[in-house]
Image (tube, grey):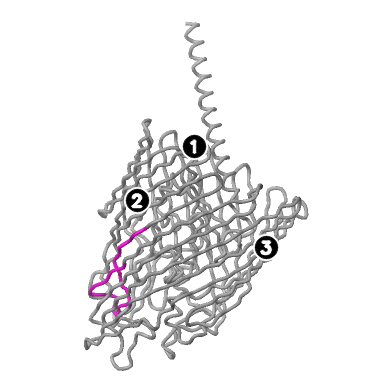
Amino acid sequence: MERIKKIIILLMVVASSINSFGETITTLLNEYEEARIEKTKDDTIGYVYIFSRKDIEQLQLNTVGDALKLVLGGYYLPNIYGVKNFMYASSITRVAEDIRLFIDDHEVSSVHTLSPFFIYDDYPLTNIDYIEIYVMGINSRLSAENGHLIVKLYTKDPSKENVTVVKALADSKKGYGLSFSSAYQISPYSSYFVMVNRSEKNFTKPVLYRTENNRNYDRTDAYLKFVYFDTVIQFLATRIKRGIFGGLSADLSPDYGRLDGTNLSVSITQKLLQDKSFELFMSYDWQDRKREESNQFPLLIYKPYEDPIFGYPVYYDDRRKFSKFVISGRKQFETDNNTLFVGGDLRNYTQSADVKTVYLTGYTREYTPYHVGYYHVYSVYFDEIYRLDKKWKFNISAKLERYSWDKNRDRTLLNGKAGFLYTQGRMLIKLFLTRMYIAPPIALIEVAATDALKPYITDVLIAGSEFRLRKKDRLKFYLFKGEIKDAYKYSSTFNGIINDDKIYRFAMVFTEYEARINNSHKLNLTGWVVSNENYRAYTPTVGGNLILHGQFRNAGYFLALLYRKNQTVKDVYIPDTYDLSAGLSYSFRDGLTLKVKGENLLNREQKVPYFSPVAGDGSYSSADRRLTISLEKVF
């Protein structure tokens, strides 16, 4: 009997030790992940929202869209072309020319619209390690290209992976996804990561006026990363085919329409000098776009497509090819109290186009002479951080840019930022003033009323405070107060895009509370309020997110509730949103993981308003109720 007691006590000690060891390993992994993110995170850029590797896995974030939907202060909604775009609260759904999406150092936006979402709205996260999202700030260390939101997707380090992963998923709307990835270290100095992904997604087809509106898509993605010493070469290829939804049709009911796109790119990053403080980056992108639409009602296309005799066309065939070449160099100088970052870049965009329209009488016109053939940007910049002591950190940066467009006047612009960070114990305070210019894309220059379309100006005051509560808990408050000058708008008088003479003022207040429980569970609560002056709110001005996820041994779970307050836009009532998603996962011992995810479980998704001279005013759904099952095998 005494021997049995001793055995039981020994087993209890061993079990306790194993449990303690498991918690220690979990803690170490969390600390390693945080340290890796801290190397790229920049606190001098407004507000930073981060999805770690663990967040991506536990929240079952399969695509970029799954992540951006959870970002506080904004919404990820389909525009009238069926393409999901990120927009800040109160903004209208549109093609977002002010959002920048990076895969590592490579900016992947469209040459035509400067928006990344036509191709990358649902880019798979198979090759992504973690995500950093920067709100309303500029910093040349992250991006030589200005944006009101900067999304950085950091790819996985193949030398740290050394696995092959096969994944398959299917959903209740008859969609599917298949992906294969393999990453290995070939030698002490070289490694590779390869990914191939194929997916199809289907949506409910609403009838806004006459016909069903289709925004289904199928996409194929391929990615290759090769690392040799301090050289990183990346290849990226994506092809997508999608429905046109409402398109350009006056009644939002095209009789026929399609959108096809192909992106191919290669980029090279090279670190030089003994201390690796100089970085050279080069990239080349080739983009192909095909767009076709026909309708019995006119297609509402701005100048120059309206004919003085025949009016607006009823058929539109748009085929374009683009290229983008970027070369940049960046050097960092470090002393005890100073960090100075200097650099410069050249961006060269070209376009060839074949566009024709057919009018109700059968009359056909071609519009090649109107197209912008090139677009060049030259910039030099610096960013300096001065550390007065352990508490005070001052930051100033400036960027001089020269824009040269075909069919638009050249511009030389100065962007800048100045501010400080103050740290006292567990408290961090930020205060920054920024000025940034958002240049007009080729798509707007081509339909501008004159050849003098200017980049619009955004001036923003950013004030924030962050508090560490207990060990890992954080509480954040942020205020963004700013104004926009020379915004783009359509003028019916001139039948084209012009710079608005109004000044649009806005204020946004964000708050976030993050708590970690036993290193295995994470709670995130966020809320925001937005107010505007001289600008109608088209999406809810008040919202909040509750996100909870974690793991019990081999089982994982998550729950996400997104709330948006009701809003009346003109005469269209948008009800309260209670978008609930939840999921479970289980990892078996042989490297097999099963996941189940339910989206929009309450069927209270956010509605998107629309306004049409023929179809009238109304709203359409932004998301379907959907069940997704996935199976992943690690070899």
Say if the magenta span includes residue 10.
no
| Residue 498 on image: x %, y % | 48, 84
* Label 1: which secondary element: strand
Q: Is residue 627 left or right of residue 469?
A: left
Ranked by sequence position, the earlier of labels 3 and 1 is 1
Decide if residue 565 is in sight here.
no
Tag 3 residue: 431
| Residue 388 on image: x %, y % | 77, 55
Q: Nearer the viewer, residue 379 or 560?
A: 379
Residue 197 is labelled as 2
- Write down the region rendered in magenta: 238-259
Ranked by sequence position, the earlier of labels 2 and 1 is 1
Residue 89's place in the image compared with 186, above or below, is: below
Say if the magenta span includes residue 242.
yes
Asked whether the residues under the numbered discs 2 and 1 touch, taking CB atoms below 8 Å apart as contact, a structural biologist would say no
- Indicate which label's residue lies in the foreground, 2 or 1: 1
Identify residue type, mark 2. Asn
> Residue at image x 52%, y 53%?
525
Q: Residues within 10 Å of mark 3 (few under 14, many from 20)?
A: some
